[in-house]
Image: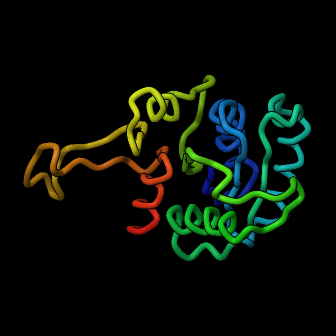
Amino acid sequence: MVIAAAPYDGRQLYTLWSEMECFTQSVDTVVLAVPDWSNKLVSQFADLVRSSIPHFISGQVKLITKYFVNDRYDVGLWCDGLQSMEENTDDEDGHHTLSDYDEFAILNDSVFALRPFSDVLDVLKQRNVRMASVSYSKAAKNFKGYGDEHYWLESVFRAFDRPGLDVFRNYS
């Protein structure tokens, strides 16, 4: 899971904390892709996550923080986070590459979670689809048409299998 976040202060971390507690229990690794200017705040936050949330404490889920220039908003942070894993970089948790995973989730920091939720990744597996999302639309741009040919997924929380991720990256 790659989470794009741009927290300016502690208040914005509440949302991110809820996502860490509720959306990450069924994943192996979380890459927190954040702007480089947030280094001090996010490094303290990441340390607290690793020492306070049970599935991070146990090592069931690994948290990797990556810092980037935030010049393309959520999509840029997602792509940078994924690219950093593709580049075969070492970090505090060991060696991770994209090829180690066959399912991927991308999420931004605008959704506040109230309870554990794995449905987006569950749908990806159960329905054997390339992409899944919290919401979708079949409306064309400016609502000038409607139907399967206009299908698109909302950007807040999406999941992909390997070929689906390749499509996302090629178009992003």
Residue at the image point whose x is 68% and y is 52% from the top:
100
Image side of residue 34 versus residue 155, left or right: right
Question: Which residue is found at the position 89% from the left and 48% from the top?
Answer: 47
Q: Is residue 135 above or below residue 154?
A: above
Which quadrant of the figure contains the C terminus? bottom left
Question: In this view of the protein, which residue sits in the foreground, 61 or 95?
Answer: 95
The vertical placement of 94 against 112, above or below, is below
**Residue at (34, 47) in percent of width and height:** 153
Q: Which residue occupies the extreme front position in the image? A: 99
Left or right of 8 on screen, residue 108: left
Rendered image quadrant of residue 123: top left
Report the side of 150 relative to 165 (left or right): left
In the rendered view, tell whether residue 66 sits above or below residue 61: below
Q: Is residue 138 left or right of residue 99?
A: left
Tell me where residue 111 appears, x and y as whole percent. 54, 41
In the displayed orientation, state which residue is furthest to the top: 115
| Image location of residue 1, percent across then percent down | 63, 47
How many marks can you see?
Answer: 0
Image coordinates of residue 146 in percent, x first then y, are: 11, 45
Q: Quadrant of residue 99?
A: bottom right
Query: What residue appears at the point 70 percent right and 60 percent down from the top-left corner?
Result: 97
- Give percent across and percent down for residue 77: 59, 65
Q: How is the image coloured?
A: rainbow
